Amino acid sequence: MGVAAHPGETAEWATVDCDEGTLTVGPDVYANGAAAITTLRPRGGTLVCHATCTTVDQSTGNANLTYRGGDATTVSCYAGTLRWDCASDITNCHNARAGHLDFDAGNGPLTVTNGYLGKGYRVTETKQRVTVTNGWKLTKCGRDDGTFERGVNYTESHAAI
């Protein structure tokens, strides 16, 4: 299934939900005249999103999302796998529980302004292409309460929040 998935197609769609199956969202999907989908909410299935999303809310289920859209304001990955296959920036990024946030899927540098990790977090970032402006904040958990795959030759600094 697709939402404006073919070249030249456009669609207006504020919230895209997917519970199962395969879904492709094309780059020219917008909401209320804005150049971004308001919310992408994958809960199951396999999704590829080329559209810009203001919010990516992957909170439940076991979705397998590949994101290739533009800059996002809020990204929450608490379940399934979210592959950030682009160099688009994230203002607020949340990861915990059973979610796997994979930054190695894409190429090119990107910035996460505010990063929040909770118990069960899993982040893959061995390409070291992400700059986290205000650092990853461990919220209600410790460093050993999740997995951060960084690769080799990096610097990690710690401070109380």
Image: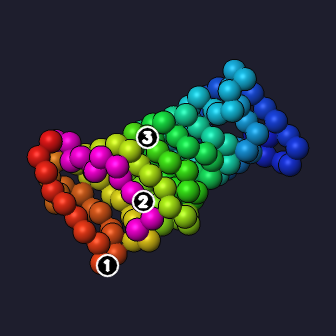
Label drawn at residue 123:
none
- Horizontal side of residue 102 vs 133, given as left or right: right
* Circle nearer the N terminus (3, 1): 3
* Circle nearer the N terminus (1, 2): 2
> Quadrant location of residue 145?
bottom left
> Quadrant location of residue 4?
top right
Q: Residue at x 49, y 56 (%)?
A: 110
Q: Which residue is mark 3?
A: 91
Q: Residue at x 41, y 49 (%)?
A: 112
Image quarter where the C terminus lies is: top left
Position above or below: 58 against 157: above
Residue type marked 3: Thr
User: Rounded to the nearest whole Å, what is the CA distance between mark 3 and mark 1?
Assistant: 26 Å
User: Is label 3 in a helix, a strand or a loop?
Assistant: strand
User: Rounded to the nearest whole Å, what is the CA distance between mark 1 and mark 2?
Assistant: 14 Å
Specify start and end residues of the magenta stretch as a single range: 128-140
